[in-house]
Image (tube, coloured by chain):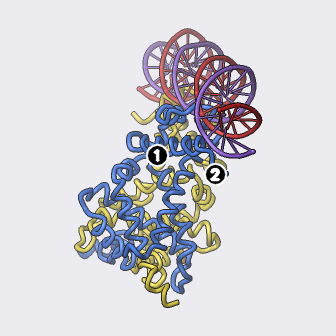
Chain colours: A yellow, B blue, C purple, D red
DNA sequence: AACTTTCCGAACACCGTGTTCGGTTACGTG
DNA sequence: CACGTAACCGAACACGGTGTTCGGAAAGTT
């Protein structure tokens, strides 16, 4: 027995409504009532499927997980998972843009990070110099940082270019020069100037 | 005319109450009423000073800003701003721990990030290879990532050790080895195995 | 066509928000 | 010290969102 069509229809209606609203409104200002209105779904129906707005978000992010997993399995496309992710974001640039700032963005980004981290935990090997969990977290946050910067400061940039910058940032780190004022004491240098 | 003692007392009472609550409860589950009870302040008084819980948070984070600025000016201590920040966090380890997970944590961390980014914008010079704003964001998120990992996975580690790891992560990046499954297509390698 | 599952929507109790206002307290100044 | 002013209190209020319940209508399945 397959899943009842009504169930499928209701759920995707809710997923889509949430995404549509995120484009327009800060996530944490979106109410369940907004979603009901947008999806044209009854109140009690919503709570029959999800316990809260946050659960709806988490469930709808499973799409992203399957996207990543597929990107890795289909080596066919010639794209690395990293590249596939950037291309995907380019398609939904407006959503990403909405996620950039503010409070709601932070919540959604956190949820996205968890999804990506979960996938990476199955992929990445152990390494010697840096603890694995730290490496995963760093990888995820670098993805996040690059994407935010891309969408906010260089919206015209292509996914391919953005991904190249991401690689360099991830594997080379930042030059000591630019970080110096943060990493070293000011005292000595100041005296000389 | 100095600031009225009552004003100062009320505000610090609220700041302190918020911090005390954050140790115990997820930030976004904390209500204004919780804060009032904890601080023993009247409802109308609260709204005479702050328009919302979020503004209270933002204002209370100004303490962090002054901490960082001082750490740079007083080269005396021998500590870099980076080191000072890690030492500071070590003192308030329990608060940091509370900020680790969940939804409330994301909101607070976002706010902390903004403070640090603001300070760095005044310190960091222009660099050639990486756009400045991207470098700042990367620096902030690496601080954030390292601290989370430190508090969650290695709570016993000293601030000095954590800061060393942070430096390496920041300026060296991640090795290509560990990132390979994410950065390269799976197809070719798989066939050979 | 009969049976089952889902959906609807109105009604409900509950809780947190942000504002108002008159009375009380404590502060700073002269 | 005493006066005037500013801050604090707390009760009351309207408002809006949450999550649950339940009987009847509608759509799905076999």
Q: Is residue D29 placed above or below A66 in the rendered structure?
A: above
Is disc 2 placed on a helix, strand or loop? loop
Q: Position of residue C25 (x, y in %)?
A: 59, 28
Q: Residues within 10 Å of mark 2 (few under 14, many from 20)?
A: few
Q: Looking at this view, is B146 or A159 the one in front?
A: B146
Instruction: Examine the rendered structure and indicate whether residue B141 appears above or below residue A23.
Output: below
Secondary structure under tag 1 reads: helix
* Residue B14 vs residue B86, the one in the foreground: B14
Residue B164 placement (x, y as % from top left): 31, 73
User: Which chain's residue wears label 2?
Assistant: B
Instruction: Look at discs 1 and 2 and give the one toward the viewer.
Output: 2
Q: Can residue A186 be seen in this view?
A: yes
Q: In which quarter of the image is the N terminus of chain A?
A: top left
Which residue has dot 1 on it?
A: B104
Residue at left offset 25%, top offset 76%? B192
* x and y percentages locating residue B40 in the rendered image: 50, 32
x 55%, y 81%: residue: B125
Q: Mark 2 points at which residue?
A: B2
* Horizontal and vertical percent position of residue A108: 51, 51
Chain holding disc 1 = B
Vertical relation: D9 (above or below) A163:
above
Residue found at x 49% / y 73%: B73
Residue in view at x 25 percent, y 74 percent: A129
Q: Is residue A96 left or right of residue A166?
A: right
Given residues C27 and B121, the one toward you in this image is C27
């Amino acid at each position: 027995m397959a899943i009842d069509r009504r169930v499928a229809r209701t759920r995707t209606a809710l997923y889509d409504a949430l995404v549509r609203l995120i484009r327009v409104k800060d996530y944490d200002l979106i109410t369940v009532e907004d979603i009901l209105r947008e999806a044209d779904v009854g109140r009690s129906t919503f709570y029959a499927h999800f316990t809260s707005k946050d659960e709806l978000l988490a469930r709808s992010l499973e799409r992203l997980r399957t996207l990543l997993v597929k990107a890795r399995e289909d080596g066919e496309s010639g794209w690395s998972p990293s590249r596939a992710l950037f291309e995907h974001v380019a398609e939904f640039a407006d959503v990403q843009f909405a996620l950039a700032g503010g409070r709601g963005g932070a919540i959604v980004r956190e949820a996205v990070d968890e999804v990506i981290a979960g996938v990476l935990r199955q992929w990445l090997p152990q390494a010697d110099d840096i603890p694995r969990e730290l490496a995963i977290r760093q990888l995820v946050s670098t993805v996040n940082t690059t994407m935010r910067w891309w969408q906010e400061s260089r919206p015209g940039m292509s996914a391919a270019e953005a991904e190249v910058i991401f690689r360099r940032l991830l594997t080379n780190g930042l030059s000591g020069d630019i970080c110096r004022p943060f990493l070293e004491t000011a005292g000595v240098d100041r005296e000389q100037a």
